[in-house]
Amino acid sequence: MSAPQLKELTREEVAQHNKGDDLWVIIDAKVYNVTRFKNLHPGGVSVLTDEEVAGQDATEAFFGLHRYEVLEKPQYKRLQVGTIKGEQSVIHGKIVGETSKVPYAEPTWLSEGYHSPYYTDNHREFQKAMRVFVDENIYEDAQAREDDGKRPSQEVFDKMAAVNLHAMRMGPGKHLQGLTLMNGIVTPEQFDYFHELIITQEIVRCGARGYGDGLLGGKVIGLPPVLNFGTPELKAKILPEVFSGKKFICLAISEAQAGSDVMGLQTTAVKSEDGKEWIVNGTKKWITNGSFADYFTVGCKTEDGLTVLLIERGPGVETRTIKTSYSTAAGTAYITFDNVGVPVGNTLGEVGGGIFVILSNFNHERWVMCCSSARSQRSVVEECLKWATQRKAFGRPLISQPVIRSKLAGMIARTESVQAWLENLTYQMTHMTYKQQANKLAGQIAFLKSYSTQCAQETAKDAVQIFGGRGITKSGMGKFVEHFYRTVTFDALLGGAEDVLSDLGVRQALRAMPKNARL
Ligand code: HEM
């Protein structure tokens, strides 16, 4: 059926349609016929038949109560019957690839009139392409899967594979050699940690924390041990499968009995009599992507200490989804290994050297989480700035209240400080080997991770206060704030709890204290 022809109407003409059985409203120079819809309206009939709304311009009332996306839903879009003669709509929804003009909604380097020493023209071109990619291919799936709890669609994984995003999310390195990255915008040699930061921060803009982890967060932490410690044969088999988005891998360390305390792990691996296999028994808990993973990078107790093995899904491996406070789109799992035979060739690193394999992963993982936390805080700043300027209370916009401005000031300062520190650290990373990073940056990254999640939690609390009841309501105006508040603790826990990380930072600093430093 073709779309009905929109009429050009005057405000006087619209004003004639002001009765329950003939009811029109104007929203942003568009005219909607809500006569039949009024009985289905979730906000009730009376608000639509109110004399200040019926036949009138209800733009301000509408945007005080609804997100723009309501008007974009097909069932509501078709209520539009006309436009106001000589007037233009000025309010718009999400535009693919657009950078926001709301102050602080973008980092300085993406804001008009500002400068940055860190980003090259290539980073800028890459960011543009990445934003379009996410807006076109990921955003909608993220919203839908975050709601229905299913893992991200295979179609999204395939599209990411087509531009080699799965490989790029592992950071710069040899694994990128020979690949065409983002349709050739960046060469494998050019690709650095700022490109990776851009990838993480663009994906985070979807505002779907569980889905974000479902989008192969497990691979970001589960694959590095294979990349760095796997045999050439193992890599030749696994990497193409994972980079093509056809197979999934996760990191399985924590257990019900042992979380951060990795030396307390109870999953065992014992050599078979012929010495060709490990026989693995035990359980793992809170394993991101575990529900749908094909491969598991597993910390096991062996005779000589801790050993990391790559286990393929097969007989004896069972996974069960755990419901957490974010979406099951993340595929968080409880896993049982029951007499699982694992070829000895799947040993990652030295037998008994597992702690080194696990620890070598942490810096990158925590840095990725800082990228993510910084960007999600920024999205909350944007939501709060928009809400505080459009919402009226006591006859004035919320923003006219000093207490609201004070909360916003804190949020903005925290967001900017996290991003600035992150960019400095990222710059250091681009100039250091992985080993130098472990030596020089483990403490700094630990501090930043701890600092950024403390900032995020503070911002979540303030944002809910600004949004009021809507900040704890899963749909409507405050839905992203509610989501942020509900899921912010994931960042604070995963990859190391705040106090543990802060302490690690201080201990690292003490190691570098000169012996002759005296007051
Ligand atoms: C084309 C016109 C309209 C459509 C399609 C529409 C649609 C909706 C929808 C889908 C909701 C559920 C909440 C959400 O998803 O945001 C809602 C809630 C509501 N609507 Fe409308 N609406 C329209 C116009 C209006 C107007 C002009 C008013 C006037 C004041 C109004 C007042 C309300 C109220 C009070 C709520 C409840 C808000 C809440 O629970 O916080 N609506 N509307």
Image: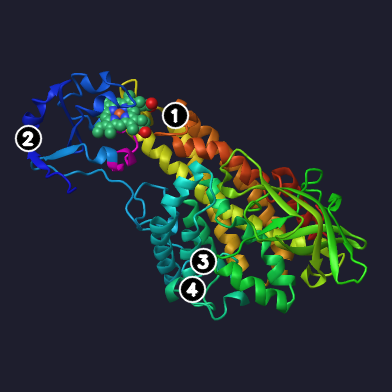
Name the quarter showing ligand 1: top left
Q: Is residue 256 left or right of residue 450?
A: right
Q: Residue 181 has which mark? A: 4
Instruction: Quickly name the residue at label 1.
Output: 470
* Mark 4 residue crowding within 10 angstroms, few (<14) / some (14–19) / many (20+): many
21, 98: nearer the viewer: 21
Instruction: Quickly name the residue at label 2.
Output: 10
Location of residue 266 with respect to 399 vertically, above or below: below
Disc 2 is placed on an element classified as loop
Gap in angstroms between the C-alphas marked 3 and 1: 36 Å
Instruction: Quickly name the residue at label 3.
Output: 165
- Mark 3 residue type: Leu
Residue at 87 percent of width and 64 percent of height: 352
Q: Are marks 1 and 4 in contact (CB under 8 Å)?
A: no
Location of residue 274 with respect to 59 vertically, above or below: below
Magenta range: 62-74
